[in-house]
Amino acid sequence: MPTTTHFRTCPLCEATCGLRITLDGDRVTDVRGDRDDVFSLGFICPKGAKLGDLDQDPDRLSAPLVKRDGEFVEVSWEEAFAEVERGLAAVREAHGHEAVALYLGNPSVHAMAGPVYNAVLAKALGTRNVYSASTSDQMPKHVSCGYMFGDPQAIPVPDLDRTDYLLMLGANPLESNGSLCTAPDFPGRLKKLRARGGRFVVIDPRRTRTADLADQHLFVRPGADAVLLFALVHTLFDEGLVGDVSPLVTGVDELRVLAGKFTPEAAAEACGIDAQTIRQTARDLAAAPTAAVYARIGTTTAEFGTLSSWLVDALNALTGNLDRAGGAMFPTSATRAAYLRRRPFRTGRWHSRVRGFAETLGELPVATLAEEIETPGEGQIRALFTVAGNPASSAPNAPRIAAALQTLEFMVSVDPYVNETTRHANVILPPPRVLQSPHFDFAFTALGVRNFANFSPPALPLPQGRPSEAAILARLVLIASATPTADPSGLEELMLGGLLAKAVAAQGSPVLGRDVAELRSQIDGDGPLERWLDVLLRLGPYGDGFGAVPDGLRLQTLLDNPHGVDLGALQPRLAEVLSTEDGKVQLCPAELAADVPRLLDWLARQKPGFVLIGRRHLRSNNSWMHNIPALVKGSNTCTLHINPADAAKLEVTTGQHVRLVSRTGSLEVAVEETDKIMPGVVSLPHGWGHDTPGTRLSVAGSTTGVNANVITDESVIDIPSGNAVFNGVPVALEAVSPSA
Ligand SMILES: Nc1nc2c(c(=O)[nH]1)N[C@H]1C(S)=C(S)[C@@H](COP(=O)(O)OP(=O)(O)OC[C@H]3O[C@@H](n4cnc5c(=O)[nH]c(N)nc54)[C@H](O)[C@@H]3O)O[C@H]1N2
Ligand SMILES: Nc1nc2c(c(=O)[nH]1)N[C@H]1C(S)=C(S)[C@@H](COP(=O)(O)OP(=O)(O)OC[C@H]3O[C@@H](n4cnc5c(=O)[nH]c(N)nc54)[C@H](O)[C@@H]3O)O[C@H]1N2
Ligand code: SF4
Ligand SMILES: [Mo]
């Protein structure tokens, strides 16, 4: 077997590191950071280094499974698709299209097939019951950006490599490697920030490894970020610190009025940060030559996630840092053409059936999935498709979801594993190995701290008869469109034709008025995903415009540059980004201001008691990487972090067990005392607890962790975005004897 070397982007997290992978035949023998990668420059983390083990995990399914008499049996691909056809038709016939739901999980954003086919699949299923991990994650940011900038995908990132001052809330990039901010070697970039004389401040209920690297760390009470951010806004106005606000910003006075009640003194107790420190933080932020406020999951998976997400960018705008070098800037994605404008942004075009929560970005909150399956009546969910998702582990009150899945009439999962979720499926359709798939990050090229583009062709061919993930999804689209035996290439032509037709009709397009068939004949690429990418690149801001810009970007450019293409530092581009009705940044959108009374109410009913938050570990990734032996060793353990003072009161020490009780359930877990967590707060990582019967996870199944989502509460959500709340969950603690 020949030894070959391949350069590929790591698909495991948002950092998009370039990897240099050595194969002996089809076995991975070595993975290291690609020193020539234009963006990651050789950086790699332990997960990337184990990509080979993940790719070759013997528990990954090699053939589709169909459940017969309660047992999974391996079947041919044709039998599996026929089973999907039968199951879907039966549910639709009996209950209609809305009875079928779709759940899209996190890894579908980290692959090419999901971004190309998932929306098409949702449309083909013809249902409003679409759910995804986005409402367990970043939906608040989409909603705040949608209302502020008119485009829910226009998310500013901190200009990490140039900023003088970084204020970071609820993010821990030393473990997560960054999120909604693609910055390979985030830790190195933070060190460089300080080395060039910049400052960075971390606000987190835990003194994390990121906080250890910072100039300053402030403990904040979980869930209080919106209050704290309001107090910072208040101080800017109060002390005359508002900077050079762009003429493209409207609503400054309205925000000043709204922030009036949030004096630092009023905020101090709820935040656990004294008023003087809040004021000083606002002064430091305003005084810095350039500054960026950046917040992540600690603030979005919280009860006021949307308010926090909004106020982060309000602070950036008020200090004159929005859209300037060293501030918070909008990346220019190589595959997003500004002239292909969307509809004006709004949420609530429909509502969830049982609790009436608003639709956001075409989705309903995952926190409502269980009740929508359980509650009888018109529109009840009877069938579910999951793609790359594990809601029976990852969603709030996961056991309720698992129980609900058990009652479905039909379920299909596109997933490589039999896990907590897919064990309930009637059909599991496993995608092929990572190395057999092409890779391009449609999502993360829009979130980079530099502009970049990087394409990885498949390193290995698909085995005979094995469909790619794209082919699996295309087939599901055809089945859902009631044309199960149609040629998938017809679907591809329809999709390409639709995209090109839009482009030739759009003002500002480089192909305005050209002939669709002529453009179609120019498209390159070995498969549908490659061809789709070629079109998006060519229509995009750096594209060749199908010949209009001779040296412009196209698929071939990326194939010629296996270490990626650096498209330069971020550029100011606010005017181009704005898609609001008046073309301005809405600093105080009515839809967001409407949520402030809920925050004031929360502030008024603060009560003492423990609250639970999450945490991440460098060697985990949500629920699905605990099956790799090298990743579940050593410090990657599922323990409950607790402050020593709290442990003393409960009379427990490290290694002893406590029972954690919330509204939804209880679980027992070993404690780990650490003064790195603030008193009154306890922390559990998520994604553990793999002892569920019926799964096929030989390594993960023997780990000892518990599922934090047994005690997270689906009844509480961030109202404007429908996002789940994983941080700030009220819990009671009691000591149990270790043997109990
Ligand atoms: N308590 C608590 N819960 C949380 C969080 C938290 O911080 N605390 N975080 C939340 C966040 S941010 C997220 S994003 C969600 C994630 O929620 P989910 O996306 O629902 O769950 P994951 O654990 O990412 O599971 C991913 C699934 O995709 C499968 N998979 C992996 N690779 C592929 C592939 O290439 N193709 C396909 N088709 N499938 C694949 C895996 O086997 C697994 O079943 O969890 C959320 N849950
Ligand atoms: N190693 C690893 N990397 C990952 C993942 C993983 O599971 N493991 N998951 C990936 C995914 S899906 C995502 S979305 C990203 C997330 O990336 P990050 O947002 O960086 O995620 P975390 O590391 O969980 O950091 C969140 C921090 O918020 C703090 N926090 C909790 N509650 C609060 C609060 O109320 N206020 C404030 N200010 N802070 C709070 C927590 O203590 C924690 O340190 O990471 C991605 N990368
Ligand atoms: S930081 Fe993320 S992208 Fe980079 S090697 Fe690790 S898992 Fe892969
Ligand atoms: Mo996430």
Image: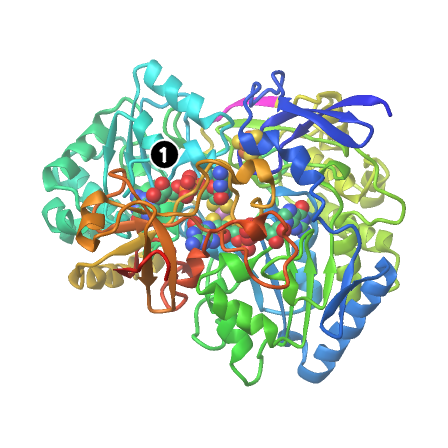
Q: Specify whether residue 88 is painted magenta.
A: no
Instruction: Residue under label 1, please give it.
Output: 322
Determine the residue positioned at 90% across, 45% down: 464
Q: Is residue 254 above or below residue 16?
A: below
- Image coords of residue 496 (percent x, y): 77, 48
- Image coords of residue 730 (percent x, y): 28, 61
- Image coords of residue 373 (percent x, y): 55, 75
- Name the amino acid, label 1: Leu
Please state the extent of the stretch shown in magenta in the rendering.
Answer: 566-571
597 to the left or right of 268: right
Specify the quadrant that holds the N terminus: top right
262 or 390: which is nearer to us?
390
Specify the quadrant that holds the C terminus: bottom left
Task: Describe the colour scheme in one phrase.
Answer: rainbow
Determine the residue positioned at 81% across, 21% down: 3
256 to the left or right of 124: left
Task: Report whether residue 223 is seen.
Answer: yes
Determine the residue positioned at 14% across, 36% down: 277
Count residues near mark 1 (Cα–Cα under 10 Å), then give few for <14, some for 14-19, many for 20+.
Answer: many
Q: Is residue 669 above or below residue 503?
A: below
Name the dominant secondary structure of the magenta segment.
Answer: strand
**Outermost residue toward the top?**
196
122 or 290: which is nearer to us?
122
